[in-house]
Image (spheres, rainbow, N blue to C red):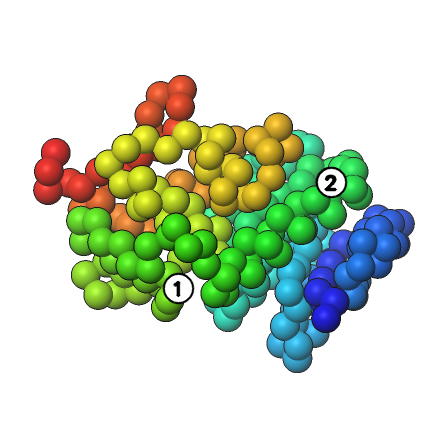
Amino acid sequence: MKKLIYAADDEKDLRDVMEGFLLNAGFEVKTFPTGDELYEEFRKKEPDLVILDIMMPGTDGLTICKKIREISNVPVIILTAKEGEVDYIRGFMLGGDDYLIKPFSPALLVVRINALLRRAEMSNGVKDNNDKSVIEFGDLKFSDAEHTICCNGKDLGFSMTEFSLLKCLLQDAGTACSRDKLLDEVWGIDSEDIESRVTDETVRRIRHKLKDAKSRVKIKAVWGYGYKLEDGDHE
């Protein structure tokens, strides 16, 4: 069955280009000139992936992303202007899974979409036989079968990207995990195709949720290399 993609952008030419490339890539596509129209359709039928421009008439794309994340973990790609770095960071804080800066290559968009969809399928039950189904570290408990990461028994409600990244760190708990490995295993594409800031901002979002949950587990930066998990009780 073809994967269904919703894309919202107020530039008709860009909508037409995206639709053409995605149709040629084998996807089913619906485009919208506003985020409000996309969200209205989303409530009727959930797609497999959403593409959202930030600046649109009506409700802005970041607010639509937040509304979607309140009801679904569907992958979301944020589109932003080159000068809109603050907006891109906000997009990740609100639950975006990836971003592209305009102007971008439609072929790269297809690569990013395929990577996110592969990761979504893995998160929804396609398991690696080398993965542990349950991992406990500090006050965190990871369950692959239930697709949860809990702190003291409470599900932290991670998005798909957050779940996948913290899963990688938990599998290597206590040792450093490189940014390149995270980019490859979490986003499924070579590090040359995606900026390392994607990893950094996702880590920032996870840290915020761990802090809110009063978890003693910390994500420590390993300068010039990547990240590792530490149990605060053993520092």
Secondary structure of residue under mark 1? loop
Q: CA distance from mark 1 to mark 2?
A: 29 Å
Identify the residue position indicated by label 2 in the image. Answer: 108
Identify the residue position indicated by label 1 in the image. Answer: 147
Q: In which quadrant will I find the C terminus?
A: top left
| Residue shown at the point (84%, 58%) measured from the top left | 23
- Residue 153 lies in what quarter of the image? bottom left
| Residue shown at the point (31%, 40%) measured from the top left | 172
* Left or right of residue 164: residue 18: right
Q: In which quadrant will I find the N terminus?
A: bottom right
| Residue shown at the point (64%, 65%) measured from the top left | 48
Measuring from the top left, give residue 129's x and y in whole percent.
Answer: 42, 55
Front-lying residue, 148 or 6: 148
Q: Residue furthest front?
A: 129
Res 37 seen here: no
Res 134 seen here: yes
Measuring from the top left, give residue 125's x and y in whole percent.
Answer: 48, 65
* Left or right of residue 207: residue 60: right
Measuring from the top left, give residue 165's x and y in whole percent.
Answer: 42, 46
Which of marks 2 and 1 precedes in the sequence?
2
| Residue shown at the point (62%, 43%) measured from the top left | 99
Secondary structure of residue under mark 2? helix
Measuring from the top left, give residue 138's x and y in whole percent.
Answer: 18, 49
